[in-house]
DNA sequence: TCTGGGGTCCTAGGACCC
DNA sequence: TCTGGGGTCCTAGGACCC
């Protein structure tokens, strides 16, 4: 059997790079992108990192720097990032046939059977994506996914030495990188695990790879056992080219400001339900259970804290926004309490099944073709003219609870009226 | 004052069954 | 007085990812 070889291709500071594509004046400047609601920093350009701005730094700590013009900040613009992500993926597909899109800015590629040397292929991928989309990427090449992630992290950590492309199959390179990669850089090791491992004196990827796998399973979990095996070159995770349908679909958001009225929460829940139902239909699923939850702020709880959730079972599986919203509203009425300042609502669709898989229920009403046509039309119009062009009447155009996005860039690529102009 | 949103997988513990 | 153990299903919670 041929040795497996994979690459992990990862866009550098992706959200920042997207903003720069349309703002060449920012090429060498510190740039940050903020989370929904402009809460905290979720992406930093290398220049912003050098300024000492931490990941997840609260915006109010960075605002002064931005006011003085030392850093350029943007609200997150997912319409733009999603579109540029599609372009990056399509560009890669012109050179590599088998791809697994792992996240908005990362993709695994199967390189088995492609002509050596593979780092030359990596450089071609890098150059073509840069030229066709304007997005810089790094490429890590290795025999397992965990090692490819580590190779990619190393390519980013030592750009002068690697040029952003690193093949970890060379044993000397492999050993050197593992010995110099802190345990936190290993995929699957988060804050908690890293602290426990460090407590045991395991501080590098090399030391984790050297642990006895069975003992890791006993002391930690099967997940960490697999991670250690993968670090030793034994593939435990395979390339998943086919995207499996989601098992749960969630739509949730913090409000731009605290909400006290039932009516405002009802609007938000209707809006989140509509969004979740849209995602449900997009993957061709039906939902049998819906969970709606609300909560007050977690910080500075002057008006008291409260959080609650309601679980609703549908009579028959459905993907109809109106049916789901009736349930969501009933759930909200159950759990709403007066006198609290609510910060967030969430709608979760679970117990999903394929549209074709539903066992006929003698007592349920037959599926209504008119309803299906209505939902399909709704999705087509919103797909063409933008989200919430058509929406349930209870959702206002400019609701009081909508999230803050004070620093939003135009949707250059997906809205005709916000097209990039040159001149 | 202010700290995201959307997912996955695993584990532990309780209920229930034979 | 003795008072099983193994399997399954469900749920909540934890940890991780980007």
Image (cartoon, coloured by chain):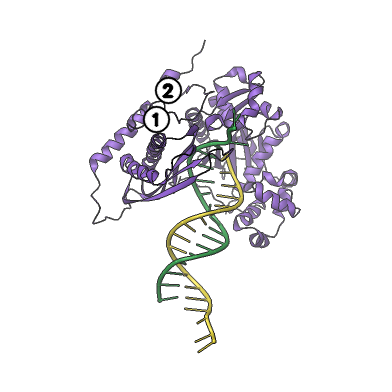
Chain colours: A purple, B green, C yellow
Residue A405 circle label: none
Q: Which chain carries label 2?
A: A
Crowdedness near tag 1: few (<14), some (14–19) or many (≥20) residues, C-alpha within 10 Å: some
Residue plotted at (71% across, 27% down): A51
Alpha carbon separation for disc pair 1 and 2? 11 Å
Q: Which of A361 and A61 is in front in this view?
A: A61
Task: Answer above or below: position of A239 versus B12.
Answer: above
N-terminal label among 1 and 2: 1
Residue plotted at (31% across, 40% down): A322
Q: Where is residue A315 in the image (x, y as percent from the top left)?
A: 30, 52
Residue plotted at (66% across, 23% down): A65
Element assignment for label 2: loop
Q: In this view, does A19 lie to the left or right of A291?
A: right
Q: Position of residue A140 (x, y in %)?
A: 63, 40
Query: Which quadrant of the view contains residue A150?
Result: top right
Q: Where is residue A137 in the image (x, y as percent from the top left)?
A: 60, 32
Q: Which quadrant does the N terminus of chain A fall into?
A: bottom right
Q: In this view, does A414 lie to the left or right of A167?
A: left
| Residue farthest to the top, as pictured | A423
Residue plotted at (71% across, 52% down): A197
- Reading the image, the residue beneath label 2 is A415
Q: Is residue A375 left or right of residue B7?
A: left
Tell me the mark number nearer the camera, choosing from 1 and 2.
1
Q: Are marks 1 and 2 in contact (CB under 8 Å)?
A: no
Residue A67 visible in image: yes
- Reading the image, the residue beneath label 1 is A387
Residue A135 visible in image: no
Q: Which chain carries label 1?
A: A
């Amino acid at each position: 059997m041929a040795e497996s070889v994979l690459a992990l291709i990862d866009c550098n500071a992706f959200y920042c790079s997207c903003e720069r594509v349309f703002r060449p004046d920012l090429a060498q400047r510190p740039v940050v992108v903020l989370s929904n609601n402009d809460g905290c920093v979720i992406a930093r350009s290398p220049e912003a990192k050098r300024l000492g701005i931490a990941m997840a730094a609260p915006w109010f700590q960075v605002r002064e720097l931005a006011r003085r013009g030392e850093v350029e900040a943007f609200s997150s613009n997912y319409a733009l990032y999603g579109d540029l992500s599609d372009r990056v993926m399509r560009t890669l597909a012109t050179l590599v046939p088998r791809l697994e899109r792992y996240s908005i800015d990362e993709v695994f590629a199967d390189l088995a059977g492609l002509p050596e040397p593979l780092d030359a292929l990596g450089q071609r991928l890098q150059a073509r994506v840069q030229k066709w989309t304007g997005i810089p990427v790094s490429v890590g090449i290795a025999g397992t996914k965990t090692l490819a992630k580590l190779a990619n992290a190393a390519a980013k950590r030592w750009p002068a030495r690697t040029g952003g492309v690193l093949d970890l199959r060379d044993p000397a390179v492999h050993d050197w990188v593992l010995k110099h990669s802190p345990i936190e850089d290993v995929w699957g090791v988060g804050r908690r695990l890293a602290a426990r491992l460090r407590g045991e004196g395991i501080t590098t990827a090399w030391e984790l790879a050297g642990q006895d796998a069975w003992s890791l399973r006993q002391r930690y979990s099967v997940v960490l056992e697999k991670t250690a095996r993968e670090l030793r070159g034994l593939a435990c995770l395979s390339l998943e080219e086919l995207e499996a349908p989601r098992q749960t679909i969630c739509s949730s958001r913090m409000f731009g400001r605290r909400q006290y009225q039932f009516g405002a929460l009802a609007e938000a829940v209707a809006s989140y339900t509509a969004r979740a139902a849209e995602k449900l239909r997009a993957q061709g699923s039906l939902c049998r259970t819906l969970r709606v939850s609300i909560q007050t702020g977690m910080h500075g709880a002057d008006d008291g804290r409260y959080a609650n959730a309601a679980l609703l079972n549908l009579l028959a599986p459905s993907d109809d926004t109106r049916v789901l919203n009736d349930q969501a509203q009933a759930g909200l009425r159950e759990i709403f309490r007066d006198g609290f300042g609510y910060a967030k609502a969430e709608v979760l669709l679970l117990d999903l099944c394929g549209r074709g898989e539903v066992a006929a229920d003698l007592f349920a009403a037959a599926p209504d073709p008119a309803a299906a046509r209505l939902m399909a039309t709704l999705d087509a119009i919103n797909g063409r003219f933008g989200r919430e062009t058509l929406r349930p009447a209870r959702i206002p155009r400019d609701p009081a609870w909508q999230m803050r996005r004070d620093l939003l860039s135009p949707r250059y690529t997906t809205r005709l009226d916000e097209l990039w102009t040159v001149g």
